Image: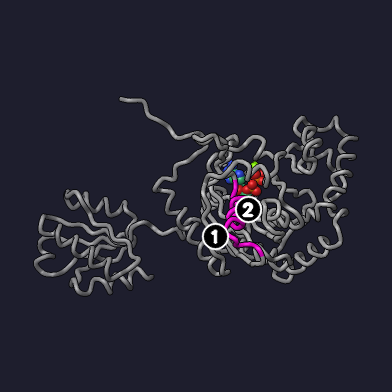
């Protein structure tokens, strides 16, 4: 046998047994964004490398070591998108969607980062994201957070996630804070690991984000960003906190929350869970009021978030919260004998006409009754229809209930659709 070719490390197939759960997750997301009047935007998966360098920042994990970058045949440097915000801003600028306008947008799709694959961390993963442009008040920050809270409710995981909030302030406030932090870190350099020492020089705020417990200990008395906030950012943050309280959204202020991308300012937030081990952030976002201009557009306030869909799916699986995921088949139609096969196909087609949304699988490939019933059972269907020569001659159909103890019935063909409609609506 020829040697099998395998998938790229960290890039997963979504197999049929999982795709139902994924579709259920995606449908819930679509319903929730629609209920807030947001519109979908779809961007290409490949962009100019410069787009990500200029937006995410040269000295970030993503740009320094995680991007899939390659030369196009004409020598242009291209990159598989590591996130959606930069592409969304690029598209908005390119098509004139942002200047003097308000846009509430969402997207969903694969992202690529060359990281060490582990549970909840892959090289191809999927994000659902929201980006809002043209609104600068804390009201819209509260809205996007409310939307995420509604999603947790839809998935039944509200008790398993917590909201962490921080404000990064204005560029100027952050620069002042940066100086104070560097001074503090310099005095404790021997307590830092190599990574943090390097970051202290290049992107000191990222040291706050270190996962190393020893570094975290060294940070115990570090100055807090909150003390350096400019007045406007302070009011903005206060406005957001008040709104969340009025709306019953619980949060924890985490002054160490800085996010790994350079474009954020003012509000930043993360939803974290303890049910996934160390990959605990399921959703992250914030304001990026400077990015549109940085990418060649007019100054436009913006706020958004991205949700890691694999982590969400993992959470639902880990917490066994998948019972609402529908089975792929509702009705399995068996056929015994040649004459019955044609009738089974006709009856199936009729049901598909009469009962939109009901999933009907018609048995193919023959076989005896026992074999067909086994397939019916494995399909997950609630009902098997039994069609043999007698049924065809008499214009009836046998109805066998696969998931409860109700007795098998024989129904006239004309009554079948309405009977199934009532049964499956339960
Ligand atoms: P982390 O700290 O876990 O590396 P990040 O700060 O790099 O996350 P973002 O760029 O903010 O993540 O992306 C938003 C969300 O996308 C994350 O909170 C996470 O849920 C998900 N995510 C990011 N990278 C990966 C990955 N390699 N595999 C799976 N999900 C990911
Ligand atoms: Mg990362």
The C terminus sits in image quarter: bottom left
What separation in Å lies between label 2 and label 1 (alpha carbons)? 14 Å
The yes-or-no answer for disc 2 within 8 Å of ligand 1 is: yes
**SS of the residue under disc 1:** helix
Q: Is residue 88 magenta?
A: yes
Q: Residue at x 55, y 69 (%)?
A: 35
Q: Nearer the viewer, residue 334 or 168?
A: 168
Q: Is residue 96 magenta?
A: yes
Q: Residue furthest front?
A: 74
* Residue of label 1: 155
Whether residue 167 is visible to the viewer of this picture, yes or no, is yes
The magenta segment is 83-99
Whether residue 280 is visible to the viewer of this picture, yes or no, is no
Q: Nearer the viewer, mark 2 or mark 1?
A: 2
**SS of the residue under disc 2:** strand
Q: Residue at x 66, y 52 (%)?
A: 284
Q: Is residue 7 left or right of residue 242?
A: left
Q: Is residue 126 left or right of residue 217?
A: left
Q: Residues within 10 Å of mark 2 (few under 14, many from 20)?
A: many
How many numbered marks does the figure carry?
Answer: 2
The N terminus sits in image quarter: top left
Q: Nearer the viewer, residue 198 or 146?
A: 198
- State which tag comes first along the sequence, 2 or 1: 1
Q: Is residue 65 left or right of residue 258?
A: left
Q: Nearer the viewer, residue 410 or 173?
A: 173
Q: Tell me: residue 74, above or below residue 111.
A: above
- Where does residue 251 sit, x and y in percent of width and height? 73, 60
* Residue of label 2: 283
């Amino acid at each position: 046998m020829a040697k099998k070719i395998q998938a790229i490390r960290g890039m997963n197939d979504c197999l049929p047994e999982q795709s139902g759960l994924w579709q259920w997750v995606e449908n819930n997301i679509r319903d929730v964004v629609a209920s807030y009047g947001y519109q979908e935007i779809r961007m290409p998966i490949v962009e100019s490398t410069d787009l990500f360098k200029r937006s995410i920042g040269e000295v970030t994990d993503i740009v320094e070591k995680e991007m899939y970058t390659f030369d196009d045949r004409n020598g242009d440097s291209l990159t598989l998108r590591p996130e959606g915000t930069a592409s969304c801003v690029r598209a908005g600028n390119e098509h004139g969607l942002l200047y003097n306008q308000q846009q509430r947008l969402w997207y969903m799709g694969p992202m690529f980062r060359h990281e060490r694959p582990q549970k909840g961390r892959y090289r191809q993963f999927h994000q659902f994201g929201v980006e809002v442009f043209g609104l600068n008040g804390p009201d819209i920050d509260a809205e996007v957070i409310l939307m995420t809270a509604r999603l947790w409710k839809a998935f039944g995981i509200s008790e398993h996630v917590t909201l962490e909030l921080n404000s990064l302030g204005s560029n100027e406030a952050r620069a002042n804070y940066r100086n104070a932090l560097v001074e503090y870190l310099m005095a404790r350099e021997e307590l830092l690991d190599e990574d943090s020492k390097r970051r202290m020089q290049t992107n000191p705020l990222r040291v706050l984000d270190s996962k190393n417990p020893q570094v975290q200990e060294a940070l115990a008395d570090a100055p807090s960003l909150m003390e350096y906030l400019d007045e406007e950012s302070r009011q903005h943050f206060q406005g957001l906190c008040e709104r969340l309280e009025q709306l019953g959204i619980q949060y924890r202020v985490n002054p160490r929350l800085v996010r790994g991308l350079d474009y954020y300012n003012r509000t930043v937030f993360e939803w974290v869970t303890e049910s996934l081990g160390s990959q605990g952030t399921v959703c992250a976002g914030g304001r990026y009021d400077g990015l549109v201009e940085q990418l060649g557009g007019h100054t436009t306030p913006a706020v958004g978030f991205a949700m890691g869909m694999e982590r969400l799916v993992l959470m639902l699986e880990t917490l066994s919260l998948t019972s609402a995921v529908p089975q792929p088949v509702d009705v399995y139609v068996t056929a015994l004998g040649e004459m019955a096969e044609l009738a089974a196909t006709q009856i199936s087609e009729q049901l598909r006409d009469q009962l939109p949304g009901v999933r009907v699988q018609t048995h193919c490939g023959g076989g005896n009754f026992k074999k067909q019933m086994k397939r019916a059972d494995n399909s997950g269907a609630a009902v098997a229809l039994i069609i043999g020569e007698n049924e065809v001659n008499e214009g009836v159909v046998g109805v066998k209930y696969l998931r409860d103890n109700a007795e098998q019935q024989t129904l006239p063909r004309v009554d079948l659709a309405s009977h199934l409609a009532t049964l499956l609506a339960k």
